Image: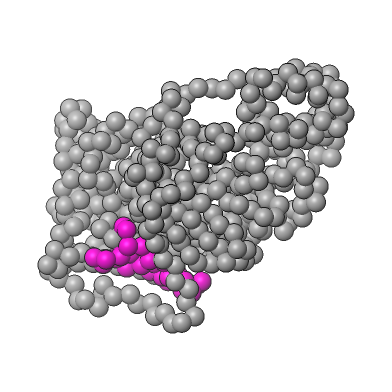
Amino acid sequence: MGMVTGSGVAGGAHELLAEMRHAMGRLNYQGSVVYLKDKQIESFQVFHSVSDGVERERMLATNTPMREVVRNAQKVTCYFPDTHTVATDTRSSRRSILLDVPEELEKLGKLYDFTLGDREVIAQKSAQLVRIDPKDGYRYGRRLWIDESSKLPLKMELIDENNQSVEQVVFTAISLEAQLPPSLLEPSTRIDASWQVKEHEALTADSLQWTLEGVPDGFRMMSYSRLRRSTDGGTIDHILLSDGLASVSVYVDDVKDDFIVGFPGKIGAINSFNRRLDNQLITVIGEVPDKTVRAIANGIRQQSSGNSSP
Amino acid sequence: MNEKLSRLQDSEVEEAELAPLLDACRDGAELKSTWARYHAIGHVIRNGAAGRSDPDLWRRVSLAIEKEPVLLVPRAKPRAPWREHAFNFALAASLAAVGLIVGRSLLANSEQVLSSSPQTLAANPAASGKLDHSRGMASAQARFDDYLLVHNESAQLAGSGGLLPYARLASMRNR
């Protein structure tokens, strides 16, 4: 990077993130994680193992409703005991549920500055701070504290446009293991026939109906899905955008009844904005600043007519 | 015509449409009233003012329109640099897989209470007077929760979601 950092070390942030990514993919570890947003705290247990090059990972909420995420070589499965629902995703199984930093960090350099910060102690371990600062006002910054010994991430913060931390995940305890018992990587949630299974099925893109003219630089479309809702028979188009770090969802909902706009949602780091487009409800949600979700929502046009306006 | 007014509120009216629309507004009391309502809706949405708590607002906005027709001139559209990079989905299609997600809305019947009270109004002008506000709010909340759930479930596809999307999922119950 060639930048003088807070610790007086030139460069190194990219290299440290690459080392972190490598460590996350080869070490066996378990620990306790705390998640903070607004005035809310959640705690989880995390287990990660690698056997014959194959990663397995499990994250379990320690409090009711004991939601659980299990990742293996084939898929990621989310268990929601409170709604008796299982969601599986086969497309993202190579990504760690702990903390995923894209492999192509150099490309992110157009959108974010990566610098080294100070050293701190996290979970009784010496950690190096890596600052990820956006180059424009359309995305949030990040702070990562990486264990200097194991290179595992010990803490992460999401920083808003006012330089305030809006979400944090912190290891309160972490231990490296020679190996983990396989049972710790198995889901503890037991499901039966009463559970609803949601699966993502990949299809060919053939019905893209929207153009997005308000998308800030660097965001790309990652998926285009159609959600079918049995409650009202309606469908919802879901477009997922990402700049490599931040993600934004665009929903185009063919609402049959009256609907409400101006539903301002801010939950932790998540902002949302919605508007009417003809008889459809456009909603944009993402861990990005408010002006980003507004810009994207206001730039949506129906492709067939070239414009939302007749 | 109501739709054109709505687009005027969003500064989305083409120049060629503007003059006839302004003439129609100037001559039509009903359109003036509609414009006043849309203007108030926009104000509430943008500024978070409690629009429905002020029964005199419509009359005052109408009076303002009467006195100051210049208010009907749309705001200039800012052209941010990144707008030039129009995000054309026809180009992006080659990168995209279309997913079909079949399942019921997890929270479609949720009766969760809002943690805050967003200022909301009916989006469909024809139905705006008929909207059952409390029922509409509950429906909007359920819909929003559904969106949030899907976003967090799929955020891993998008990059460095990592633990955060799942932590958000686990924390949704407490809202």
Point 62% across, 28% down: residue: B12
Instruction: Choose between A143 and A53: the one closer to the eye.
Output: A53
Q: Which residues are magenta?
A: A65-92
Point 16% across, 52% down: residue: A22
Q: Is residue A231 above or below residue A171?
A: below
Residue B81 x %, y % = 43, 23
Residue A12 x %, y % = 16, 37
Residue B132, quarter of picture: bottom right
Instruction: Choose between A280 and B75: the one closer to the eye.
Output: A280
Left or right relative to B5: residue A106: left
Residue A264 x %, y % = 59, 45
Q: Is residue A180 above or below residue A298?
A: below
Q: Is residue A182 above or below residue B155?
A: below
**Magenta highlight on residue B92:** no
Residue A138, quarter of picture: top left
Q: Is residue A123 visible?
A: yes
Residue A9 x %, y % = 16, 33
**Magenta highlight on residue A71:** yes
Instruction: Choose between B115 and A292: the one closer to the eye.
Output: A292
Considering the image in quadrants, where does the C terminus of chain A appear?
Answer: top right
Point 71% across, 31% down: residue: B4
Q: In this view, which residue lies farthest toward the bottom? A: A192
Point 34% across, 56% down: residue: B163
Residue A166, quarter of picture: top left
